[in-house]
Amino acid sequence: MLAAVLAPAAWAGPGAAGTPGAPEGRSTAAAAAAPAPASAASAASAAVEVRDWVERIHRAALAQSYQGSFVVWSSIGGMTSSRIWHATDGTAQIERIEALDGSPRTVFQRGELVRTFLPQARIVKEERRDMPGLFPHLSQADSDAVQRHYRARLIGRDRVAGQEADVVWLAPRDALRFGYRLWMARPSGLVVKLQTLGLRGQVLEQAAFSQIDFEAPPTVPQLAAQMDDLHGFRLLAVPLVKTTVREAGWQLRGPVAGFRPGDCYKRGAAANDKVPMPPLQCIFSDGLATVSLFFEPYDAARHGGEPRRMDMGATQTLALRAAGGAAWLTAVGEVPQETLRMLADQIEPAR
C-alpha cells in the first residue's frame, strides 16, 4: 500500500474500536459473517449502491484538495507514517508524499510522471508509469468488476481524523481475494481509512489518516513548482516502456479468478545497474485488488531452484521458475497465496 508509494526502489495500528478491525458497536460475529444471499431486487439495489460508492470515490479525488498525516499498520508488526499534500483544480491532480520513517524520501506524482527525491543521495528518480496512491486503485476501481467479485454492505458510521464517515464492507465472493472495510467521509466520499481483511476476517493491514486539513490545502501550481525544482539534485531517469502482456511475449492459458491483464512495463534499452529492476512487470487486476508479475531470466546462483513464498501481512509474494525453467517469476499482490499460485501456473510464453 503506502509502502509501495514510498519504497526507495524504482519498482514498485490497530486503531479500530472493539474487536480488531470491527467498527465500534458491532460484534465480532456480525462483522465477520458473510452477507446473506440476496434476492434479485436486493442484488440490483446492491449493484446501484456499489456504483454510487465507486463514483463518490472517483469524484472525491478530483474535488478535494487537502493536506494531512497518514499511518499504515501491518499485522506483522510494521508501521509507517507520512505527510501528504493533495491538490486538484477539478481536472489535474498532483500529490506529494513525504516519508516520516526510515530513509528520507519524498514522492511526487502528476499524471504518469513520478519523481522520487532522495535527499541523502541528492538524486531524483524519474519514471513515467501509473503508481498506487494512498489507497491503491480505489480511485480507479471498476464498479462492475467490484460487484462481480465482492458483496458490498453499509455497516455503520464512524469518525476518523475528525471526519464523519460511512463504513462500507466489501466481502469477497470467494477465497481468492481479500476483503476490505473502508471509511468514506461524508458527504465527499474521500476515503479516510481502509482495512484489508484476511480470509478469517482478521485485519491484515490498516491505512488511515490521523489528521486531515481541508482549510489550508496546497494548490496545483504550488506542488508543481516543488516537483519541478531539481536544484542541487541529479536527475536519474528510470527507462520504462509501457506495453501489454502479449506484446511482452506472455499470455494466460485460461482465466484466473477474474484477474485480467493490464499494463506491462519493460526495462528500456538505456537501463543500467544504477537503476536495478526486473526486465518486465505486468499488472493483473480484478477491478480492485492487483497482482504484479515480475519476469527475469533464471539465474541458478541468485534464484536457487525451489519456489519461495513470503507473507508480509496483506502483501503476499511467490517466486518460482517459469517458462520451462528459463524464467524466474515473482508474483506480488494483496491477495491470498492460492491466487498467486494460480496466476503463476497459468502464465506461459505467448504462441
Image: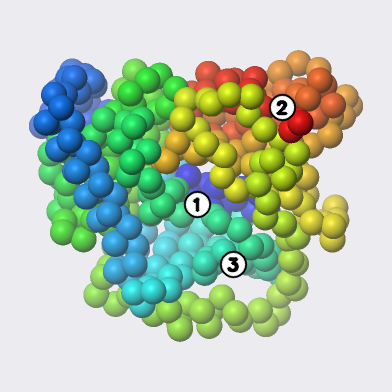
Q: Does residue 179 appear in the picture of this structure?
A: no
Element under disc 1:
loop
Q: The disc labelled 2 sits on which kind of residue? A: Glu
Residue 218: which numbered mark, if any?
none
Nearest-to-viewer mark from 3 and 2:
2
Estimate the spatial distance between the alpha carbons at disc 1 and disc 2, rounded to whole Å.
Answer: 27 Å
Image coords of residue 173 (percent x, y): 33, 23
Q: Earlier in the sequence, mark 1 or mark 2?
A: 1
Q: Nearer the viewer, residue 149 or 277?
A: 149
Image coords of residue 262 (percent x, y): 56, 44
| Residue on which the image places disc 1 | 132
Q: The disc labelled 1 sits on which kind of residue? A: Pro
Q: Earlier in the sequence, mark 3 or mark 1?
A: 3
Circle count:
3
Image height of 200 relative to 91, above or below:
above
Direction from residue 214 to residue 297 in the image, left or right: right
Q: Residue at x 23, y 34 (%)?
A: 152
Image height of 202 relative to 73, above or below:
above
Circle 1 crowding by C-alpha within 10 Å: few under 14, some 14–19, many from 20:
some
Q: Residue at x 46, y 70 (%)?
A: 94
| Residue on which the image places disc 3 | 113
Q: Residue at x 42, y 27 (%)?
A: 177
| Residue on which the image places disc 2 | 348
Element under disc 3:
strand
Estimate the spatial distance between the alpha carbons at disc 3 and disc 2, rounded to whole Å.
Answer: 31 Å
Element under disc 2:
strand
